[in-house]
């Protein structure tokens, strides 16, 4: 939706025989400025400690030194943190795909008492800042003896207002005919939803999955609060505390930031179109 | 985000011919509706409204995070008035917001305008602008602390190579907040680009063509057609940006940690410190509530103002 179709682009170029647009002169440097820090991060992660502790530091690595990665994977608990992040983000994504799409379907399609109130309340919660709820949330999990477990990281994110909102607006624009046919064939509401609706809702589910994964993977605030022992850290929390302990070991820290960033970038690049559509659609809806 | 839900269609189509079947289906919808909606609704409300109420109760105590603490009435709120760090945090948050919102909106709209007409490599550009937005703020904070390091950073390396004096950046109380604001803009404004781009593509071609025929130049088209058309989106992005600024934590936590000498401390960061570093949870809750009341007021005023002018937010 935001991409100009190629068919529209090519003929105009051919017809007018124009030179590449002057807009590139602004866009190219600006877009490179956006990503150059990440390229530098990748470069720094394969530099030696001596290279990085020199001033001025080199722009590009003289060779490829994997000591940073080796140190990270063997001396620290990084592999454990990574696994924790995968578990936490994975469970959250799956749960939101099921629960938020169910709620979205109900809010968009089924008529039940209190529907509007519930939907408005859910969406209004996006105005409640996390710093307001974080202290009591900590106390709740503490009381339940769930603090310092992965469960404490997962539970508050099992469903989200944004997810419910996204799925509700998706199902409002979803053709009814399919469900009606299945209903007439004697399918129950649950049957219709799980066998007919969900398979067709794949684009929206993919968008929800991408957005949820990025948020869940990147979260730092709640893991910092809820987790107190190293082995239960997520990558973000591990990275944040890691820096304090290895102040001078920049190659290792940079290796950590690379390995933390790669999963979200991969997910983003695969799901880019859906991600962009969902963001734009959510705002315009 | 609009909360309007269309219900008209549902009514019409769900009406089956016979009355007894109708009521049965109604009943079925009740049960199915609630069983579908309840898990998400209960989870979302349970993890927001419940703690929100509890936070208020907590703000009236001297809880130390471990014990419940004693009720102290509104003493915590009175303490706020004389807490220099609280006011410093408010000032920093306002300064950050004051830099962040205008710059990120203008940059976002500018880039979106450049990308709006068919251009080669739009996919590449859009991906580039979004990469800092999707990458983790914690990693970006670490990276930027390294890049802007006063002694070993690459930025000072380039500056001194160009013959200019090295800067303190994140170690200099007078520069840190500005550098942090710049970094924050870098991480976030790609979102604005995408949203503006979608909004621009909704402006009818005829309107733009008509303007061109009437001899409107680029500036007048921008000023009188584009800016008013995307105003509701601008308002949304401004509110969103405000929320982002009020929740600004991750990037700080891995770069300046609110320093040097509280020059980059924000309200969220202060709440975190109060509750989880100094163990003054009651007071922390009071700070959070004071901020919440203030920001809610700002957002409601913004929205009402927007509605009055006939914009749908």
Image (cartoon, helix red, strand yellow):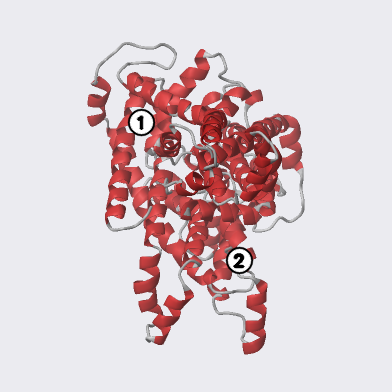
Q: Residue at x 23, y 31 (%)?
A: B81
The vertical placement of B222 against A189, above or below, is below
Mark 1, residue position: B288
Determine whether the residue tagged by mark 1 lies in a helix, strand or loop.
helix
Q: Quadrant of residue B171?
A: top left
Frontmost of labels 1 and 2 is 2
- The front one of B258 and B124 is B124
Distance of label 1 from label 2 (alpha carbons): 42 Å
Determine whether the residue tagged by mark 2 lies in a helix, strand or loop.
loop
The vertical placement of A97 against B311, above or below, is above
Chain ID of residue with mark 2: A
Q: Position of residue B129 (x, y in %)?
A: 56, 59
Mark 2, residue position: A3
- The front one of B198 and B189 is B198
Q: Residue at x 32, y 16 (%)?
A: B61
The vertical placement of A98 against A54, above or below, is above
Q: Position of residue A100 (x, y in %)?
A: 57, 37
């Amino acid at each position: 939706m935001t991409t100009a179709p190629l068919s529209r682009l090519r003929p105009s170029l051919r017809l007018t025989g124009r030179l590449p647009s002057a807009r590139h002169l602004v866009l190219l440097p600006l877009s490179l400025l956006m990503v150059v820090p990440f390229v530098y991060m990748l470069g720094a992660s394969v530099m030696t400690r001596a290279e990085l502790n020199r001033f001025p530091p080199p722009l590009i690595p003289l060779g490829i030194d994997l000591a940073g990665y080796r140190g990270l994977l063997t001396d620290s608990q990084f592999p454990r943190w990574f696994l924790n992040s995968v578990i936490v983000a994975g469970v959250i994504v799956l749960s939101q795909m099921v629960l938020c799409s169910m709620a979205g379907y109900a809010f968009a399609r089924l008529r039940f008492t209190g529907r509007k109130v519930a939907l408005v309340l859910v969406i209004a919660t996006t105005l409640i800042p996390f710093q307001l709820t974080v202290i009591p949330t900590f106390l709740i999990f503490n009381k339940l003896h769930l603090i310092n477990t992965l469960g404490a990281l997962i539970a508050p994110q099992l469903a989200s207002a944004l997810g419910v909102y996204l799925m509700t607006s998706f199902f409002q624009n979803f053709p009814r005919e399919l469900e009606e046919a299945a209903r007439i064939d004697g399918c129950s509401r649950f049957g219709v939803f799980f066998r007919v609706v969900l398979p067709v809702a794949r684009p929206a589910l993919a968008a929800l999955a991408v957005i949820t994964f990025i948020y869940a993977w990147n979260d730092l605030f709640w893991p910092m609060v809820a987790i107190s022992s190293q082995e239960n850290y997520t990558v973000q929390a591990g990275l944040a505390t890691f820096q304090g302990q290895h102040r001078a070991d920049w190659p290792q820290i940079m290796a950590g930031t690379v390995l933390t960033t790669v999963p979200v970038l991969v997910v983003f690049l695969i799901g880019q179109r859906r991600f962009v559509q969902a963001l734009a659609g959510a705002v315009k809806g | 985000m609009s909360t309007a839900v269309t219900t008209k269609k549902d009514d019409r189509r769900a009406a089956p011919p016979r009355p007894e079947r109708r009521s049965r289906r109604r009943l079925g919808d009740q049960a199915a509706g609630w069983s579908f909606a309840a898990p998400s609704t209960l989870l979302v409300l349970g993890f927001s409204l419940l703690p929100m109420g509890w936070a208020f109760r907590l703000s009236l105590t001297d809880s130390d995070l471990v014990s419940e603490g004693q009720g102290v009435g509104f003493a915590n709120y009175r303490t706020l008035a004389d807490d220099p760090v609280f006011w410093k945090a408010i000032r920093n948050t306002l300064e950050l917001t004051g830099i962040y919102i205008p710059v990120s909106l203008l940059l976002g709209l500018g880039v979106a305008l450049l990308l709006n007409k068919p251009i080669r490599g739009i996919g590449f550009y859009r991906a580039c602008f979004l990469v800092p937005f999707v990458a983790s703020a914690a990693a970006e904070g670490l990276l930027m602390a390294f890049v802007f390091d006063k002694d070993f950073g690459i930025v000072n390396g380039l500056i001194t190579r160009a013959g200019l004096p090295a800067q303190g950046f994140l170690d200099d109380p007078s520069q840190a907040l500005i550098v942090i604001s710049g970094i924050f803009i870098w991480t976030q404004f790609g979102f604005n680009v995408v949203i503006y781009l979608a909004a621009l593509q909704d402006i009818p071609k005829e309107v733009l063509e008509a303007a061109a025929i009437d001899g409107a130049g680029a500036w007048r088209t921008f000023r009188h057609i584009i800016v008013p058309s995307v105003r509701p989106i601008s308002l949304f992005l401004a509110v969103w940006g405000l929320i982002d600024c009020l929740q600004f934590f991750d990037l700080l936590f891995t770069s300046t940690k609110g320093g040097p000498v509280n020059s980059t401390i924000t309200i969220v960061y202060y709440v975190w410190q109060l509750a989880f570093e100094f163990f003054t949870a009651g007071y922390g809750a009071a700070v959070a509530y004071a901020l919440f009341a203030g920001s809610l007021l700002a957002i409601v005023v913004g929205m009402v103002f927007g509605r009055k002018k006939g914009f749908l937010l």
